[in-house]
Image (cartoon, grey):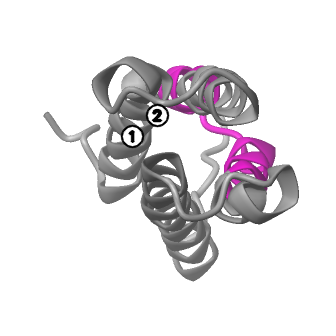
Amino acid sequence: MNQWTNARLCDVANLILGAILFFSPWIFAFAAGPQTQNALGSGILIVVLSIAALAAFAVWEEWVNLVVGLWVLVSPWVLGFQATTAMTVHVVIGILVAVLAALELWMMYQNPPTQSAA
């Protein structure tokens, strides 16, 4: 159980958030269009990045997760689905994903992994 660090818990939380975003068009009955397509694509990307980070941590995965979280946050205004339930879901999940990715990056830079000589 030593391997369940805070960073891994952030990855698991992002995995769950990505799955919620993926299923949100059905859960919250989004209208067909860019909000549904964005939720599906971004949700899959967040899930894949989280699984990759859980399998083998790499710094670039967290940076990409941060960018995707920021994209999900601003996408309602870029794609034009403001004042909808889809906007609320995207903004909340985008903030959470971006904050978790930033927190994980901050933790990594505060306590860089040590490499042992084999």
In the image shown, does 66 or 115 lie closer to the viewer?
A: 66
- The N terminus lies in which quarter of the figure? top left
Whether residue 71 sits left or right of residue 109 in the image: it is right
Magenta-colored span: 48-68
Q: Is residue 102 above or below residue 115?
A: below
Could you tell me if the residues under marks 2 and 1 are in contact, i.e. CB atoms within 8 Å?
yes
* Residue 60 place in picture, x, y as percent: 81, 46
Q: Residue furthest right?
A: 78
* Residue 51 place in picture, x, y as percent: 52, 21
Badge 1 amino acid: Leu
Labelled disc at residue 21 = 2
Badge 2 amino acid: Leu
Which residue occupies 64% across, 62% down?
82
- The C terminus lies in which quarter of the figure? top right
Labelled disc at residue 17 = 1
Q: Secondary structure at mark 2?
A: helix
In the image shown, does 24 or 1 lie closer to the viewer?
A: 24
Magenta stretch encompasses residue 51:
yes
* Residue 114 place in picture, x, y as percent: 58, 58
Label 2 or label 1, whichever lies nearer to me, is 2
Q: Main secondary structure of the magenta part?
A: helix
Whether residue 90 sits left or right of residue 74 in the image: it is left
Q: Secondary structure at mark 1?
A: helix
Which residue occupies 36% across, 31% down?
20
